[in-house]
Amino acid sequence: MRRYDADVIVVGAGPAGATAARLLAAWGISVLLLERYRLPRYKPCGGAITKRTIQFLAPLDISPVIETWVRKIVVQSPNGESFATNLPEGLIATVMRDKFDTYLTDAAILAGAKLKSGEPVLRCEQRLDGVEVITARETYRCLALIGADGANSVVAEQLGLKPKRRAVSIVVELSPEARERWDDSIHLHFPFSLNGYAWCFPKGDHLSAGIYTRSPQIPNWREWLHLYLANLELSDCLDRQKIRGHTIPIADKRSVFHKGNVIVVGDAAGVADPFTGEGISWAIYTGRLAAAFVRAFLEGERDALSDYTRAVRKEVLGEMNAANRFAKILFSLPQFSFRHFLRREPVLNNFAKLLGGEVTYRELWNKALRKGLSLLMRS
């Protein structure tokens, strides 16, 4: 009989992989979690956690790793006008990804998963009786594999599942002095020609700031970043050694999320929000889905992994498509959007609820189609 090192191997201990590993282990399934880096490790990220994300993680309590609860959102138009709305308690928080990812991984270990960190995966090979995963140290065997290894996923690349479309994010951590000048608010600026937005988030004793664009590159990103920080009077708090850039894979309607006994989740699957670039929420959601469908597969449901692709297309891509519609409007016509919509308090409140996960893109889009955009201005 062929030896298996685990029923399931999960590659990547980010939010998606750690969530899938925790749930599978809690159900009594043997799980090996392989992580390229030693934990904790720095991860450039806005680190926004929404109410919906917290619900996806329940009953796991993440309050020990929350840096700041956001009290207000400020949005700024291309011509510099700013509009603000206060947030209800518990809608949006921020985390540092090194602490957050380690916390989720520790929860998976506590549930029974086995972690091997500092062990990069080189390739995986599907066999008739399972999957082989070859790392820099060893070869492991499993019945099913979950690729949760991020935007530069080895698993997705090798199996032809890598999303073709990419957005770009630039992230910088500002000095603690900047935090002293800031309240517990999120600031979003929508300039002309960026095809995205600039942002600044509070995190415990410092601020994170950055740029997100739906375009595949930002040739003049340094200029964008410096202009934005100057606008906030925070240029003196910039540490050039702490600027990081990364791509954000974005799935489309042609995307497939499984092949044989392998499925992909999170950034490896390209399930980031095309409007905000936020990926934690859908990473955790697909981690949950993956765990459920892999469990069904191990229990004998032969089509379970195909069903996973269908579920992601229906539940996640449907929402991403609606998000993309909003992104095209706001990013293409930012000043028009502010003049006619976002400057109105009811619309701004709906926008805040959208960012916090209290309403979905599809709900808001369908509301606009059914009742007309004027309804968004009333409630």
Image (cartoon, rainbow, N blue to C red):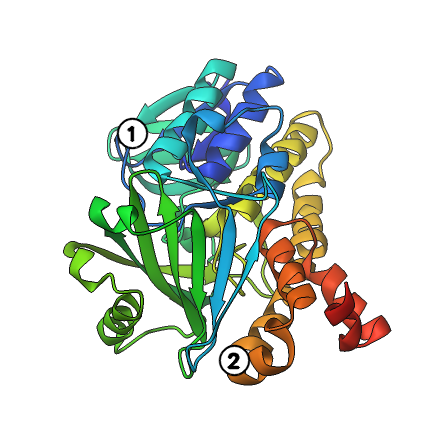
SS type, badge 2: helix
The mark that comes first in sequence, 2 or 1, is: 1
Report x, y in % for residue 364. Answer: 73, 63
Q: Which mark is residue 39?
A: 1
Query: Is 178 placed left or right of 64 in the picture?
Result: left
Q: Which kind of residue does numbered mark 2 sit on?
A: Pro
- The quarter of the image holding the C terminus is bottom right
C-alpha gap between disc 2 and disc 1: 40 Å
Q: State which quadrant residue 99 falls in.
A: top left
Amino acid at pointer 1: Leu
Residue 170 shows up from this direction: yes
Mark 2 or 1, which is nearer the eye? 2
Q: Position of residue 2 (x, y in %)?
A: 48, 20
Specify the farthest residue to the right.
Answer: 370
The residue sitting at 56% across, 78% down in the picture is: 338
Tell me: residue 174, above or below residue 330. Answer: above
Give the structural element (helix, strand or loop) at label 1.
loop
> Where in the figure is residue 42, as x and y percent of width and height?
27, 40
Q: Which residue is mark 2?
A: 334
